Image (spheres, rainbow, N blue to C red):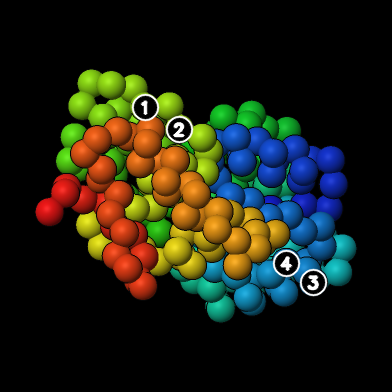
Amino acid sequence: MRALIVEDETYLADAIRTGLRRESIAADVVYDGDTAIENLSVNAYDVIVLDRDLPGIHGDDVCSWVAANRPECRVLMLTAARTLDEKVEGFELGADDYLAKPFDFPELVARLRALERRAGVSHPPSLEAHGVRLDPFRREVYRNTRLVRLSNKEFVVLELLMRAGGGIVSAETLLEKGWDENADPFTNTVRVTISNLRKRLGDPWLVRTVPGVGYRFGAPS
């Protein structure tokens, strides 16, 4: 999952980004509505954590823009506004969920995971294939009965590959969905992460390279 955090309280925004990265969620941060629209215009985000009271373009207008131009992106409004009328207004603007400040971080993560499952094709709470079980909420991976300890990026890549259901995922897609906007598109970080992931999962390898195309998750042929 890739998230955009739009919050003008810089300390809070940076803290959310750090927390989401620990949960294997790639996250970018912007601090005003104008930059939010710019980022949303060029990047494919799965979810956006959106404050309503923003400098520049107001958060309500950002929400309306997302609903009109990026309907596949789910919006979680994160704001100090607590009244029922304010919440209803947020939903009418196109928000998919609403969380009032102050909030508990585990609840934020759970709500984002739930929004991801509702986006496009419904995702099951856990993924199982070829003897591997991945639980996004507990951030646990088992191969048969063995617990596999993965880094955050290895976990993200495995989840993306397993969600593809055996289909091929390009290195560009892995980089776009698994890393933030500061990732170098010419880096070999995806290849290195794939190599490390194979070693951690063990033999026989389940992450296959499709030369010139990308990678897929599946049993050895």
- Circle nearer the N terminus (1, 3): 3
Identify residue for label 1: 148
Q: Which residue is mark 4?
A: 36
In-front residue for pair 168/160: 168
- Residue at point 63%, 46% (across, down): 84
Locate residue 189, reporting x and y percent. 55, 53
Q: Callout 3: 10 Å neighbours few (<14), some, many (20+)?
A: some
Q: Secondary structure at mark 3?
A: helix
Q: Position of residue 89 (x, y in %)?
A: 63, 59
Q: Amino acid at mark 1?
A: Val
Judge whether 16 appears above or below 58 on screen: above
Give the Cα distance between marks 2 and 1. 6 Å
Q: Which residue is mark 2?
A: 150
Determine the secondary structure under disc 2: loop
Q: Are marks 4 and 3 in contact (CB under 8 Å)?
A: yes
Mark 1–mark 3 Cα distance, whole angstroms, equals 42 Å
Q: Is residue 113 above or below residue 86?
A: above
